[in-house]
Image (cartoon, helix red, strand yellow):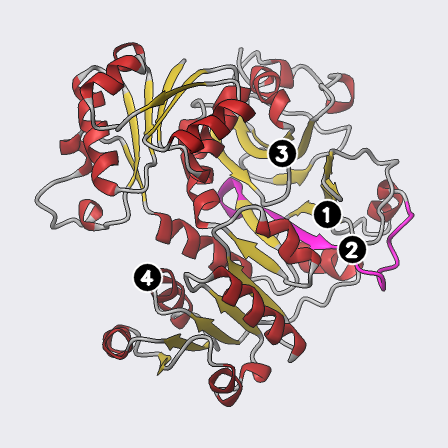
Amino acid sequence: MRVVVIGAGEVGFDVARILSMDQHDVVVVDVDQDRLESVANRLDVMTIHGNGTSAHVLEAAGMKEADLLVAVAAIDEVNIIACMMASRLGVTTTVARVRSRELADAQSILKAADLGINLIIHPEESTAREIVGLLRRASATDSLTFVGGNMQLVGMRIDSDCTCPDRPLNELAAELPDHPFRVASIVRGVRTLIPTGADRLRTNDQIFLVARPKDMPHVIRHFGKNEGRIQNVMIMGGNEVGLLIADELQGERNKRVKLIVPDRETAEKQAALLPNVLVIHGKETDIDLLATEGLGEMDAFVAITDDEESNLVTCLLAKHLGVKKTVALLSKVAYIPISQSIGLDAAVSAKLAVSREIMSYLRGKHVLSVATVHGLDAEIVEMEAEPRSAITKGPLSELNLPRGVLVAAVDHGKKSEVATGKTVVNPGDRAIVFVLPSMMAKAERLFVN
């Protein structure tokens, strides 16, 4: 498949990286020569210097032969015009990152389809959904659901007071027979491991557990974590992401939410939109204000301003004051692994949230969803087994799955199970599979006939 990516920023880079590893023919277009040089030095892709709205530039990128356009430049209008031109040239699938929500409005004069756009991605909505998911599970560094909510993934750090280090994973699993789980991946330093039952955990490992939602609290306690409820939440940041998070949380029972907004006019507007949220006008980085408003009494603190250094510092202050859960919005992806090493619970990148949503849409029809987790060099895919596909030929232990591919759970329709060597995947079943990037093509071939 030939793919043209407009925009060589972090989102464009991430999309190009994944598509390139899947052996697609990728061309990246950007007006910034330095960004293009960085992409060319790190990825096996072609680069074109120029504006994504130029017919000559798109022709040089081979748009007439392209199957897919992903427009993720920093300017909405560039993305929209690029999709319009690609659609006129016969490109079958176009994806655009658009910050304005007008095109998604039911009352809008123009719809996405009118502009030749198949999928619109809203960065703020993607980011807000990810943060809300993290807030719903106190001890998790990451939290995702699959197969209609029947299976859950939770990431957590192995602390020094945990009793599980230096014990085989199959031994840990055997101690909880009524609440089956699987350690599907381990991040150790900068390495991502797809473990076997004989592998042992170490202190400071970041692990990713898969279990049914009803079993997950028992599993979390088994690993020495206290899964307390988050009721009091303070959000620092009066942008659209903060509004979306507060709006989602205000409808939840027993949630008490405070939103710090620096601009008075914005604060008044958001107070009218959020009747069950205490909107406070004040400087977001005013430490005295945060303390006066009860930062130390919060269960969770979310810092989502445009100043990521302030987000990091205020989250560290919150941890110092005893806040159980801190989440920081970071624009520099390189800061994310650092944030957890210095004590933050979770960090979210709006750019990676967008690339995750794009890749989920672009996978084949047998791939129902795709997720990526910050710091985990693996994709988590939900795939449906086609009739006569290799994955349906017997128990998992007899299939000789490629190294770097792990089936973590299977949904059979009426029931879901955590996968073991005895598990059989039947045609039509949906499986949650952990895949190292270089093995994605082989993993997909297991599920097609």
**Label annotation for residue 207:** 1
Q: Answer yes or no: do the residues labelled 3 and 1 have beta carbons within 8 Å?
A: no
Q: Earlier in the sequence, mark 3 or mark 1?
A: 1
Q: Answer yes or no: do the residues labelled 1 and 4 have beta carbons within 8 Å?
A: no
Circle 3 packing at 10 Å, graded few (<14), some (14-19), many (20+), is many
Asked whether, in this view, residue 246 is left or right of residue 349, the answer is left
Q: How far apart are marks 3 and 4 (CA)?
A: 30 Å
Residue numbers of the magenta segment: 146-167
**Residue 137 in the image: x percent, y percent?**
59, 62
| Snapshot quadrant of residue 72 | top left
**Residue 8 in the image: x percent, y percent?**
40, 32
**Label annotation for residue 240:** 4
Asked whether, in this view, residue 184 is left or right of residue 213, the answer is right
Q: Looking at the picture, tell me which residue is in the foreground, 165 or 75.
A: 75
Residue 246 position (above or below residue 68): below
Q: Looking at the picture, tell me which residue is in the foreground, 318 or 168.
A: 318
**Label annotation for residue 158:** 2
Residue identifier under label 3: 378
- Helix, strand or loop under label 1: strand
User: In this rendering, which labeled residue sits more in front, label 1 or label 4?
Assistant: 4
**Residue 291 in the image: x percent, y percent?**
53, 86
Q: Distance between the residues labelled 4 and 2?
A: 34 Å
